[in-house]
Amino acid sequence: GENVEQHPSTLSVQEGDSAVIKCTYSDSASNYFPWYKQELGKRPQLIIDIRSNVGEKKDQRIAVTLNKTAKHFSLHITETQPEDSAVYFCAARRGTSYGKLTFGQGTILTVHP
Amino acid sequence: DADVTQTPRNRITKTGKRIMLECSQTKGHDRMYWYRQDPGLGLRLIYYSFDVKDINKGEISDGYSVSRQAQAKFSLSLESAIPNQTALYFCATSDPPAGGQETQYFGPGTRLLVL
Protein backbone atom coordinates (compact mmCIF):
# COMPACT_ATOMS: atom_id res chain seq x y z
CA GLY A 1 0.00 0.00 0.00
CA GLU A 2 0.84 3.66 -0.03
CA ASN A 3 3.38 5.03 2.44
CA VAL A 4 3.74 8.76 3.11
CA GLU A 5 6.73 10.17 4.98
CA GLN A 6 6.59 13.73 6.29
CA HIS A 7 9.44 15.95 7.49
CA PRO A 8 10.24 17.67 9.69
CA SER A 9 8.21 16.47 12.66
CA THR A 10 8.58 19.87 14.32
CA LEU A 11 9.35 23.27 12.82
CA SER A 12 9.89 26.52 14.64
CA VAL A 13 10.06 29.86 12.80
CA GLN A 14 9.90 33.54 13.56
CA GLU A 15 6.88 35.52 12.49
CA GLY A 16 7.34 36.72 8.94
CA ASP A 17 9.67 33.89 7.95
CA SER A 18 8.76 31.17 5.48
CA ALA A 19 8.05 27.56 6.43
CA VAL A 20 8.42 24.49 4.25
CA ILE A 21 7.12 21.01 5.01
CA LYS A 22 8.02 18.09 2.77
CA CYS A 23 6.37 14.77 2.07
CA THR A 24 7.39 11.78 0.00
CA TYR A 25 5.07 9.04 -1.21
CA SER A 26 5.72 5.52 -2.40
CA ASP A 27 2.90 4.69 -4.81
CA SER A 28 3.51 6.12 -8.27
CA ALA A 29 -0.23 5.70 -8.98
CA SER A 30 -1.10 8.36 -6.39
CA ASN A 31 -2.54 11.42 -8.07
CA TYR A 32 -4.15 13.58 -5.40
CA PHE A 33 -2.30 15.28 -2.55
CA PRO A 34 -4.20 17.33 0.07
CA TRP A 35 -2.85 19.19 3.06
CA TYR A 36 -4.79 19.43 6.31
CA LYS A 37 -4.24 21.85 9.19
CA GLN A 38 -5.14 20.95 12.76
CA GLU A 39 -5.09 23.73 15.32
CA LEU A 40 -4.61 22.80 18.95
CA GLY A 41 -7.64 20.92 20.23
CA LYS A 42 -9.46 21.27 16.93
CA ARG A 43 -10.34 19.03 14.04
CA PRO A 44 -8.23 18.74 10.86
CA GLN A 45 -9.34 20.97 8.01
CA LEU A 46 -8.33 20.98 4.36
CA ILE A 47 -6.24 24.01 3.47
CA ILE A 48 -4.96 23.24 -0.02
CA ASP A 49 -4.64 20.31 -2.40
CA ILE A 50 -3.00 19.48 -5.69
CA ARG A 51 -3.63 16.96 -8.40
CA SER A 52 -0.89 15.19 -10.27
CA ASN A 53 -1.52 17.05 -13.52
CA VAL A 54 -0.38 20.29 -11.86
CA GLY A 55 3.10 21.17 -10.61
CA GLU A 56 2.21 24.03 -8.31
CA LYS A 57 -0.84 25.61 -6.73
CA LYS A 58 -1.08 28.79 -4.69
CA ASP A 59 -3.68 30.24 -2.37
CA GLN A 60 -2.61 33.55 -0.84
CA ARG A 61 0.27 32.79 1.54
CA ILE A 62 0.27 29.04 1.04
CA ALA A 63 1.45 27.03 -1.92
CA VAL A 64 1.99 23.39 -2.70
CA THR A 65 4.50 22.00 -5.18
CA LEU A 66 4.59 18.51 -6.61
CA ASN A 67 7.47 16.58 -8.19
CA LYS A 68 5.98 13.42 -9.65
CA THR A 69 9.31 12.07 -10.83
CA ALA A 70 10.82 12.23 -7.37
CA LYS A 71 7.48 11.40 -5.71
CA HIS A 72 7.52 14.26 -3.31
CA PHE A 73 5.41 17.31 -2.60
CA SER A 74 5.84 20.27 -0.32
CA LEU A 75 3.80 22.88 1.52
CA HIS A 76 5.17 26.42 1.53
CA ILE A 77 3.86 29.08 3.89
CA THR A 78 5.18 32.60 3.38
CA GLU A 79 5.04 35.54 5.78
CA THR A 80 4.12 33.26 8.64
CA GLN A 81 1.85 34.52 11.39
CA PRO A 82 1.24 33.17 14.92
CA GLU A 83 -2.15 31.85 13.80
CA ASP A 84 -0.31 29.54 11.38
CA SER A 85 0.87 27.59 14.43
CA ALA A 86 -0.73 24.15 14.15
CA VAL A 87 -0.10 20.56 13.13
CA TYR A 88 0.01 20.09 9.37
CA PHE A 89 -0.68 16.76 7.70
CA CYS A 90 0.04 15.83 4.13
CA ALA A 91 -1.81 12.98 2.47
CA ALA A 92 -1.85 11.02 -0.76
CA ARG A 93 -4.55 9.14 -2.60
CA ARG A 94 -4.25 6.59 -5.35
CA GLY A 95 -6.26 7.42 -8.43
CA THR A 96 -8.55 4.40 -8.08
CA SER A 97 -8.90 4.60 -4.31
CA TYR A 98 -11.24 7.52 -3.84
CA GLY A 99 -11.68 8.34 -0.19
CA LYS A 100 -8.69 6.32 0.96
CA LEU A 101 -6.23 8.95 2.03
CA THR A 102 -2.87 7.92 3.46
CA PHE A 103 -1.62 10.60 5.83
CA GLY A 104 1.87 11.59 6.80
CA GLN A 105 2.94 11.67 10.43
CA GLY A 106 2.32 15.39 10.87
CA THR A 107 4.47 18.48 11.42
CA ILE A 108 4.06 20.69 14.46
CA LEU A 109 4.65 24.24 13.25
CA THR A 110 5.27 26.95 15.83
CA VAL A 111 5.44 30.58 14.74
CA HIS A 112 7.04 32.82 17.35
CA PRO A 113 5.91 36.46 17.48
CA ASP B 1 -17.72 22.15 11.49
CA ALA B 2 -20.92 21.53 13.47
CA ASP B 3 -22.30 19.43 10.61
CA VAL B 4 -20.28 16.42 11.79
CA THR B 5 -20.73 15.48 15.43
CA GLN B 6 -19.25 12.75 17.58
CA THR B 7 -20.36 11.29 20.89
CA PRO B 8 -18.97 10.96 23.43
CA ARG B 9 -16.23 13.59 23.27
CA ASN B 10 -14.27 11.91 26.03
CA ARG B 11 -14.41 8.38 27.34
CA ILE B 12 -12.50 6.42 29.93
CA THR B 13 -12.97 2.67 29.95
CA LYS B 14 -11.31 -0.46 31.26
CA THR B 15 -9.52 -3.22 29.44
CA GLY B 16 -11.96 -5.80 28.10
CA LYS B 17 -14.99 -3.52 27.98
CA ARG B 18 -17.04 -3.04 24.84
CA ILE B 19 -17.57 0.55 23.82
CA MET B 20 -19.18 2.37 20.93
CA LEU B 21 -18.27 5.71 19.45
CA GLU B 22 -20.93 7.43 17.40
CA CYS B 23 -20.79 9.82 14.49
CA SER B 24 -23.63 11.77 12.93
CA GLN B 25 -23.62 14.19 10.02
CA THR B 26 -26.09 16.60 8.51
CA LYS B 27 -24.03 17.34 5.41
CA GLY B 28 -25.87 14.77 3.31
CA HIS B 29 -22.64 13.03 2.37
CA ASP B 30 -22.65 9.39 1.37
CA ARG B 31 -19.06 8.70 2.42
CA MET B 32 -18.00 8.33 6.03
CA TYR B 33 -14.72 7.37 7.66
CA TRP B 34 -13.20 6.52 11.01
CA TYR B 35 -9.60 7.47 11.80
CA ARG B 36 -7.43 7.29 14.86
CA GLN B 37 -4.76 9.85 15.65
CA ASP B 38 -1.69 9.01 17.67
CA PRO B 39 1.25 11.33 18.33
CA GLY B 40 3.91 10.89 15.68
CA LEU B 41 1.75 8.55 13.61
CA GLY B 42 -0.63 10.95 11.95
CA LEU B 43 -4.15 9.91 11.03
CA ARG B 44 -4.74 6.26 10.22
CA LEU B 45 -7.86 4.94 8.52
CA ILE B 46 -9.77 2.29 10.48
CA TYR B 47 -12.92 1.76 8.37
CA TYR B 48 -14.77 3.59 5.66
CA SER B 49 -18.20 3.40 4.05
CA PHE B 50 -19.28 4.80 0.70
CA ASP B 51 -22.98 4.17 1.30
CA VAL B 52 -25.26 2.39 3.76
CA LYS B 53 -24.61 -1.04 2.28
CA ASP B 54 -20.88 -0.56 1.79
CA ILE B 55 -18.31 -1.16 4.54
CA ASN B 56 -14.58 -1.42 3.94
CA LYS B 57 -11.57 -2.06 6.13
CA GLY B 58 -8.87 0.54 6.34
CA GLU B 59 -5.24 0.05 7.25
CA ILE B 60 -5.78 -0.71 10.96
CA SER B 61 -9.17 -2.44 11.33
CA ASP B 62 -8.13 -5.24 13.70
CA GLY B 63 -9.92 -4.94 17.04
CA TYR B 64 -12.58 -2.63 15.62
CA SER B 65 -15.95 -3.02 13.96
CA VAL B 66 -18.38 -0.53 12.45
CA SER B 67 -22.04 -0.14 11.69
CA ARG B 68 -23.63 2.22 9.14
CA GLN B 69 -27.12 2.59 10.55
CA ALA B 70 -28.20 5.25 8.07
CA GLN B 71 -26.67 7.64 5.61
CA ALA B 72 -26.13 10.08 8.45
CA LYS B 73 -24.80 7.69 11.12
CA PHE B 74 -21.63 5.65 11.34
CA SER B 75 -20.60 3.95 14.58
CA LEU B 76 -17.27 2.50 15.62
CA SER B 77 -17.10 -0.30 18.19
CA LEU B 78 -14.27 -1.70 20.21
CA GLU B 79 -15.43 -5.19 21.10
CA SER B 80 -12.87 -5.70 23.86
CA ALA B 81 -10.89 -2.55 24.51
CA ILE B 82 -7.15 -2.75 25.15
CA PRO B 83 -4.76 -0.01 26.35
CA ASN B 84 -3.07 0.46 22.96
CA GLN B 85 -6.43 1.60 21.60
CA THR B 86 -6.02 4.72 23.67
CA ALA B 87 -6.10 7.47 21.06
CA LEU B 88 -8.02 10.38 19.57
CA TYR B 89 -10.68 9.11 17.18
CA PHE B 90 -12.06 11.16 14.33
CA CYS B 91 -15.03 10.60 12.12
CA ALA B 92 -15.05 12.25 8.70
CA THR B 93 -17.40 12.61 5.76
CA SER B 94 -17.05 13.50 2.10
CA ASP B 95 -18.87 13.68 -1.18
CA PRO B 96 -17.63 11.73 -4.18
CA PRO B 97 -14.68 13.49 -5.82
CA ALA B 98 -15.37 16.37 -8.14
CA GLY B 99 -12.64 16.73 -10.71
CA GLY B 100 -10.41 14.52 -8.61
CA GLN B 101 -10.65 16.77 -5.56
CA GLU B 102 -12.27 15.44 -2.41
CA THR B 103 -12.61 17.36 0.83
CA GLN B 104 -13.02 15.32 3.97
CA TYR B 105 -14.88 17.07 6.79
CA PHE B 106 -13.85 15.92 10.23
CA GLY B 107 -15.84 15.71 13.42
CA PRO B 108 -14.53 17.20 16.68
CA GLY B 109 -12.93 13.95 17.81
CA THR B 110 -13.43 11.51 20.68
CA ARG B 111 -10.60 11.15 23.16
CA LEU B 112 -10.54 7.56 24.43
CA LEU B 113 -8.50 6.29 27.35
CA VAL B 114 -8.35 2.54 27.99
CA LEU B 115 -7.04 1.65 31.44
Image (cartoon, coloured by chain):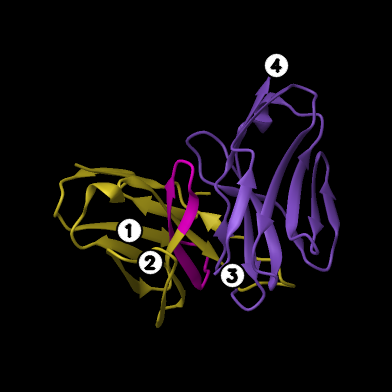
Q: Is residue A62 left or right of residue B11?
A: right
Per the model, the C-alpha gap separating discs 1 and 3 is: 20 Å
The magenta segment is B25-44
Q: Earlier in the sequence, mark 1 or mark 2?
A: 1
Pointer 3: what residue?
B95
Per the model, the C-alpha gap separating discs 4 and 3 is: 38 Å
Q: Are marks 4 and 3 in contact (CB under 8 Å)?
A: no
Letter of the chain that mark 3 sits on in the rendering: B
Amino acid residing under circle 1: Glu
The chain coloured yellow carries which letter?
Answer: B
Q: Residue at x 40, y 83 (%)?
A: B53
Pointer 2: what residue?
B73
The image shows residue B46, relative to residue A76, as above or below, that is below
Per the model, the C-alpha gap separating discs 3 and 2 is: 15 Å
Amino acid residing under circle 3: Asp
Q: Residue at x 29, y 48 (%)?
A: B84
Viewer-proximal residue among A12 and A84: A12
Viewer-proximal residue among A43 and B29: A43
Label 4: which secondary element:
loop
